[in-house]
Image (cartoon, grey):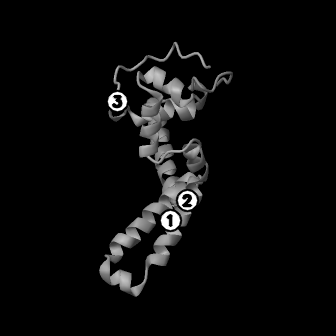
Amino acid sequence: MADLSHIPAKKEKYHKGINIADIIELVEHKGLTHGEAAKILGCDRSNVSAHLRNYGYKPGDLKKYQHLRADILSFHQMRLLNYLTDEKLKKSSAMQIASMYGILYDKERLETGKSTTNVAYADIVKAKEIEENRIKAFEDKYGLLETDDPLNKGTTN
């Protein structure tokens, strides 16, 4: 059995008062049994089990979802596109359906490390040029030479 002495116990005795996040932290992340988690939470093992059952939770679900999240989002995008029939569009706002698809698409890109916002490279180059000109003007005005730069150590005039 794991050493549980460092985790404070809760006083609540009924599963309705147990925070599901606390249960998942103990069971999923710390690898404790329902009985060990119940001891820490100050309730009976059956309360922990009932609470997880009420949420439809099974061990490993969370890790599996996190691992497959981008694929799950892609799957729901596909479902939304398949939902776009003439009959359904008449009943639902096209904007609602398109917005839902767009949100899922952005979240999938985020999950796979792809950009969710496009930045114009020309704007970055122009901003850099403006800042370089401002620095040059400041240096010219105050007589700062490149060799006076404290970050450019080891150089001399």
Q: Which residue is mark 1?
A: 76
First along the sequence among labels 3 and 1: 3
The residue lying at 42 percent from left, 38 percent from top is 51
Tag 2 near tag 1, CB within 8 Å: yes
Q: Would you identify the image quadrant in which residue 99 lies?
A: bottom left
Name which residue type carries label 1.
His
Q: What is the secondary structure assignment of the residue under circle 2? A: helix
Q: Nearer the viewer, residue 129 or 78?
A: 78
Q: Which residue is mark 2?
A: 72
Residue 7 position, x and y percent, is 48, 17
Residue 41 position, x and y percent, is 43, 23
In the picture shown, does residue 115 fall above or below 148? below
First along the sequence among labels 3 and 2: 3
The residue lying at 44 percent from left, 77 percent from top is 83
Q: Which residue is mark 3?
A: 14
The residue lying at 34 percent from left, 70 percent from top is 96
| Relative to 102, 13 lies left or right | left
In the picture shown, does residue 110 fall above or below 79? above
Name which residue type carries label 2.
Ile
